[in-house]
Amino acid sequence: MSSAEQRREELKATWELARGCVKCPQLAATRQTVVFGAGNADADLMFVGEAPGANEDRRGLPFVGQAGGLLDQLLSEIGLRRDDVFIANVLKCRPPGNRDPLPQEIDNCQDYLFKQLELICPKLVCTLGNFATKLLRGDPATGITRLHGRAEVRTIGPREVRLYPLFHPAAALYTPSMVATLREDFSRIPDLLQEALPDDRPAPVPDVALAFEPVIEPSVAVAVVEQGRETSVVGQAAEPADQPSGEGPISESPRQAAADSPQLNLF
Ligand code: SF4
């Protein structure tokens, strides 16, 4: 089994654990889906946001509303598509009313994110907003206003990653000047992707085991379907969304990926 295949299989196993997780009782009781993440499971570029919103909760996909539309637009302006990257959140379940994640919830969920980072092995991780930035920098005192647009190499788990804090697109939606700043920060991403890391790929594929014991709903049935070559979604199957939170549908449906591709589609 190739390293890419091994990493994909580990990612699927992690998703299977997360989709039945009830470590945060309130979130588990109120969520509709666990929004594990979506994108290219072998991406060089990964985005980490805060938590699913209402539309994401219904569709099981991250960044499918207005903020996701802005993210797609900014990606297109630097020659990338959603399928080229992997998108995840600090929390995999929606906080009721879109409240801020609680410290205990972040603590409960962070190992899923660290596992994603370990298995996807991105060169560049763009943290979107305060929660992802503070968690992955390990510095709760320094906020995104001071850090945005400043790349730095950090050791996360077994490898070094270049972190690049950015404003959260949802925050920028209501502040035109912040959109301009976000666009300017995005423009540096192609160059950052070309910069070598001291500890660059290919990363070894350890015989990884989750460093935590997730609490699994016994009733959750797990079905994993690998599809054609270009499908790149990890998470729940989408359904049409209404837009109570002002968020719109994603611009394209998941496409099919080959069974031997590092990309995957989990239903
Ligand atoms: S730890 Fe993560 S996946 Fe588990 S219930 Fe909490 S937010 Fe959801």
Image (cartoon, grey):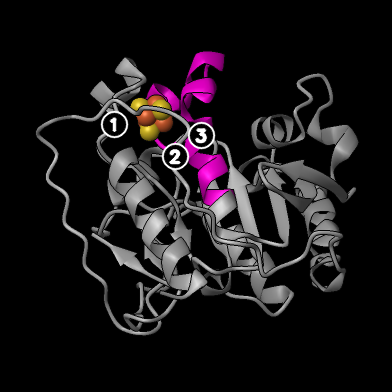
Q: Position of residue 81 (x, y in %)?
A: 58, 75
Q: Is residue 63 visible in the rendered structure shown here?
A: yes
Q: Is residue 107 magenta?
A: yes
Residue bounds of the magenta highlight:
92-117
Mark 3 C-beta to ligand 1 under 8 Å? no
Q: Is there CB contact under 8 Å for labels 2 and 1?
A: yes
Q: Is residue 13 above or below residue 156?
A: below
Q: Is residue 200 above or below residue 179?
A: below
Residue for badge 2? 52
Query: How far apart are the two marked residues, 3 and 1, measured between alpha carbons?
Result: 19 Å
Give the crowd class for mark 2: few <14, some 14-19, many >=20 residues within 10 Å: many
Query: How far apart are the two marked residues, 3 and 2, measured between alpha carbons?
Result: 17 Å
Out of 10 and 216, give the one closest to the viewer.
10
Out of 81 and 178, give the one closest to the viewer.
81
Label 1 SS: loop
Mark 1 C-beta to ligand 1 under 8 Å? yes
Query: How far apart are the two marked residues, 2 and 1, measured between alpha carbons?
Result: 10 Å
- Place residue 229 in its image quadrant: bottom left
Q: Position of residue 56 (x, y in %)?
A: 38, 46
Label 2 SS: loop
Q: Quadrant of the N terminus?
A: bottom left
Residue for badge 1? 31
Give the crowd class for mark 3: few <14, some 14-19, many >=20 residues within 10 Å: some
